[in-house]
Image: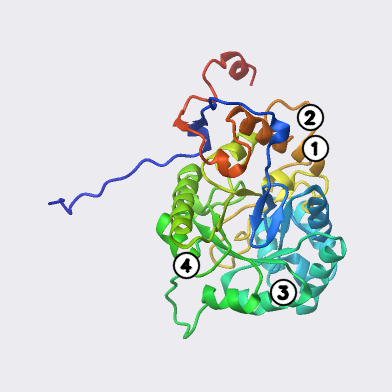
């Protein structure tokens, strides 16, 4: 019998603790297919821009869409609260660090204007991009219907932690199976980090699971709540749920690793861990096209009672095209992310992302420092 006085801990791994093992066969990187699917939509690049006000506005969504990615618009942010969001974003960027959280809490108390929901989505559609929009669970039924009516192609429901079973005082809360039926567009739901929760969400009929609690550069959830699972382990567990669910039902649900990705190497490890795509926040916040003007803040930074995020200065380092495709003279892996991915897939002999899921991975805590004494001394 197991002694109930003791609980065991299993080891979990983040990006810096693992490495991808080269394959026995290599292929030309240019012959790799890096697309992924969300419902009936095929997205050429396996990258989504996070639904954060410093990252996505209609202009950014159109720009990323033209390059092959997918941007997610935050329907509860400044874009739908203010007629002229650029002025609000400029005030956030200029605010002293010690005052910015109070300013954000004030800014996000302005009411959401339903008219602006339609206008922002209309601007993305007019630019020729696939439109994805996001809300928190509390607003999903109301704003989701408005978004789809305005032309949104994909709808995301996001919060710090999302489950299929939620206990509250509400007589009838958000039921994902009903939401999927009503909206009739692919629904992404997150965030979660476990096999069991991912499985239950998939059984509700959703099209994609967002994986990650607290790894984002501007998020402080792990410090404030002590909650989270390192991204490699979280992705592997949710990908295992996807694979088992697919074998059982024949329906494939997309896994999207959301947060904690800084370099091409991190992106490659997320996909090799089982993700079909990744969601990027701070990486895209550094682009010339991002609306945050070199700053970035998390979705929960403006929480009225318990902020779980902070504004960070990320700077403006490159264009969106340079971040994705280069050219670059940076040697730290922060630019030409798609070139890094295609090269890694080629080295592993993976022609598609699904084949890349089969790449061997090893625990390698010293992978970034082994033999790098001169680089470390230079730093």
Q: For mark 4, what is the residue?
A: 203
Of 259 and 293, nearer the camera is 259
Q: Does the residue at mark 1 contact the one at mark 2 (Cβ under 8 Å)?
A: yes
The Cα atoms of the two marked residues, 4 and 1, are separated by 39 Å
Q: Residues within 10 Å of mark 1 (few under 14, many from 20)?
A: some
The disc, 1 or 3, on the residue closer to the chain's N-terminal end is 3
* Pair 2/3: label in front: 3
Q: Say which label, 2 or 3, has the lower sequence index.
A: 3
Instruction: Mark 3 or mark 4: name the one nearer the start of the chain.
Output: 3
Point out the residue furthest to the right here.
126
Query: Residue 344: percent from the left, percent from the top?
Result: 62, 31
Q: Position of residue 75 (x, y in %)?
A: 70, 68
Earlier-in-chain disc, 1 versus 2: 1
Q: Earlier in the sequence, mark 4 or mark 1?
A: 4
* Label 1 to label 3: alpha-carbon separation: 32 Å
Find disc 2 in the rendering and name its residue. 328
Give the CA separation, mark 2 to mark 3: 39 Å
Is residue 227 something one can see in this rendering? no
The numbered mark, 2 or 4, whose residue comes first in the sequence reads 4
């Amino acid at each position: 019998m197991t002694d109930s006085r003791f609980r065991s801990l299993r080891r979990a791994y983040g990006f810096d603790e693992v490495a991808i093992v080269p394959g026995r066969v290599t292929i030309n990187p240019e012959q790799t297919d890096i697309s992924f699917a969300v419902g009936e939509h095929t997205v050429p690049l396996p990258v989504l821009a996070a639904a954060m006000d410093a990252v996505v506005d209609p202009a950014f969504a159109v720009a990323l869409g033209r390059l092959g990615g997918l941007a997610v618009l935050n329907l509860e942010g400044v874009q739908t609260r203010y007629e002229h969001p650029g002025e609000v974003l400029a005030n956030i960027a200029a605010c002293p660090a010690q005052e910015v959280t109070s300013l954000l809490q004030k800014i996000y108390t302005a009411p959401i204007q339903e008219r602006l929901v339609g206008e922002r989505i209309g601007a993305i559609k007019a630019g020729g991009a696939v439109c994805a929009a996001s809300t928190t669970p509390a607003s999903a039924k109301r704003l989701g219907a408005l978004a789809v009516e305005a032309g949104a192609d994909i709808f995301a429901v996001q919060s710090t932690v999302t489950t299929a079973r939620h206990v509250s005082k509400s007589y009838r809360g958000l039921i994902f199976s009903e939401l999927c039926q009503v909206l009739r567009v692919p629904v992404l739901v997150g965030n979660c980090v476990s096999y069991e929760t991912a499985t239950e969400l998939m059984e509700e009929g959703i099209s994609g699971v967002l994986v990650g609690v607290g790894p984002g550069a501007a998020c402080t959830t792990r410090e404030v709540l002590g909650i989270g699972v390192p991204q490699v382990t979280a992705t592997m567990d949710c990908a295992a749920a996807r694979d088992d669910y697919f074998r059982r039902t024949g329906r494939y649900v997309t896994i999207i690793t959301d947060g904690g990705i800084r370099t091409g190497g991190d992106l490659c490890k997320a996909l090799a861990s089982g993700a079909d795509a990744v969601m990027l926040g701070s990486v895209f916040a550094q682009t010339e096209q991002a609306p945050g003007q070199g700053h970035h803040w998390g979705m929960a930074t403006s929480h009225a009672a318990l902020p779980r995020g902070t504004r960070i200065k990320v700077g403006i380092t490159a264009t969106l095209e340079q971040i994705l495709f280069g050219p670059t003279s940076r040697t730290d892996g922060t630019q030409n992310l798609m070139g890094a991915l295609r090269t890694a897939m080629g080295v592993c002999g993976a022609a598609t992302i699904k084949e890349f899921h089969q790449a061997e991975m090893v625990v390698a805590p010293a992978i970034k420092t082994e033999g790098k004494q001169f680089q470390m001394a230079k730093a």
